[in-house]
Structures are given as structure tokens and as C-alpha cells.
Amino acid sequence: MRLFVAAVVPSALRSEIALRVARLRGRVAPASWPSEQTLHLTLAFLGETREATLEALLAELGTTELPPAVPARIGGPGFFPDAKRPRVGWLGIEPEEPLRAIASAVRAAAVRAGAAAMDARPFRAHLTLARLRSRWREADVTAFRAAFDAWHPEMPIDRVVLFESRLSSRGATHLPLLERSLIEPPPAAP
């Protein structure tokens, strides 16, 4: 099963992002845009994970002490690898340091549970909005930035969720397997 741990974007914010993306679609070169329902802040991408590892993962994530909730906000737009050679368009989330601490705790729990296929790339707090199908011109990059540059709403990070991602011809479906509050302490171990 394909697993990842993420912070969920509040529904009102997902709707606003979807409206801004809808206005962009006809104005920029083709891209794959995530559905409103699947928008999330990835903390740890675990990839293909054996079902035998799932029980340990649920136990570790369910009882690990996690950092407190973060009063985050949307930062600015950006591109991977960069704006001159964009392949992915994203929105940054700030402040990054407390989010990095949450990602680090989640990743450590996954390693203890034996999730060996975990993505080893450094954490970067962002929401992926576009996977570019072709090279974007400078005008496309400018339009993407203009849609989000001066927009910095609050995005509280107050819970993390372990998801199973099921891929189909209609796109990905994310099924929550475990949800943890960052406001309340973890349950006591038995």
C-alpha cells in the first residue's frame, strides 16, 4: 500500500486555492492540478509499504510525542527545481522551522516502525499545486506568481494524518488511516 503522512488543509482554504487555480487553468501552459479534496502538506512520503509494517506504523504514530500545533500561513509561490526550469508549481507554508520539527518527529516514528521506503529528501513546507506537462514560458510563471503572490491567509497546522493513497485512472484517492491532534497529548501507552 502507498502511504504518506500529511497535515490537512482546512476546507475553506482548499476552496479558495481551487478558485485561484481555476482562474489560472486557461491562462498557462498545460499542467496537472490536484483536486481540491487531495490538497495537503506532505510531512513524510512513505511510498509502497508492506501491510506487515502498517500495524507498527499505526502504533508509533499513535503514541509518539509530536510538537505542538503551529499557527502557520501561506507564504509565497515557488517552483521546483526553480522558476527558470519549472517542473512543479507550489505554495510555501510559513514558518518552516516548527513545521520541519513536526515532519522530523513523524519521519522518526516511521523509521522506528520500519517504513524503509521513506523519501529521504529534506523537508520543504509547501503545497503542490501544479505538475507541469510542458515547459512553461516566462508569462506562465508570472501568471502563477500573480495568482498567489500577495495572498497569505492563515493555515493552522493542528493535526497530522496517515493516508493511504490509491491511484486510478481518475486520479488519487486519499484514505485516512490514523489522525493525530497536535493540540492534545498522545494517548498513554497500554
Image: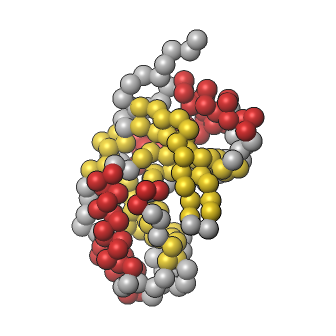
Q: Position of residue 15 (x, y in %)?
A: 31, 60
Q: Position of residue 140 (x, y in %)?
A: 40, 84
Q: Position of residue 93 (x, y in %)?
A: 38, 54
What residue sits 69% from the left and 47% below the top? 1
Q: In the rendered image, is residue 3 in sight?
A: yes
Q: Vertically, is 124 above or below 131?
A: above
Q: Vertically, is 132 above or below 12?
A: below
What residue sits 45% from the left and 63% below the top? 35
The number of numbered badges drawn on the structure is 0
Q: In the rendered image, is residue 112 in sight?
A: no
Question: The C terminus is located in which quarter?
Answer: top right
Q: Vertically, is 150 above or below 4?
A: below
- Most foreground residue, 65 or 27: 27
The image's colouring method is secondary structure
What residue sits 37% from the left and 42% below the top? 157
Judged left or right of residue 180, residue 11 is left
**Residue 68 falls in image quadrant:** top left
- Most foreground residue, 78 or 41: 41
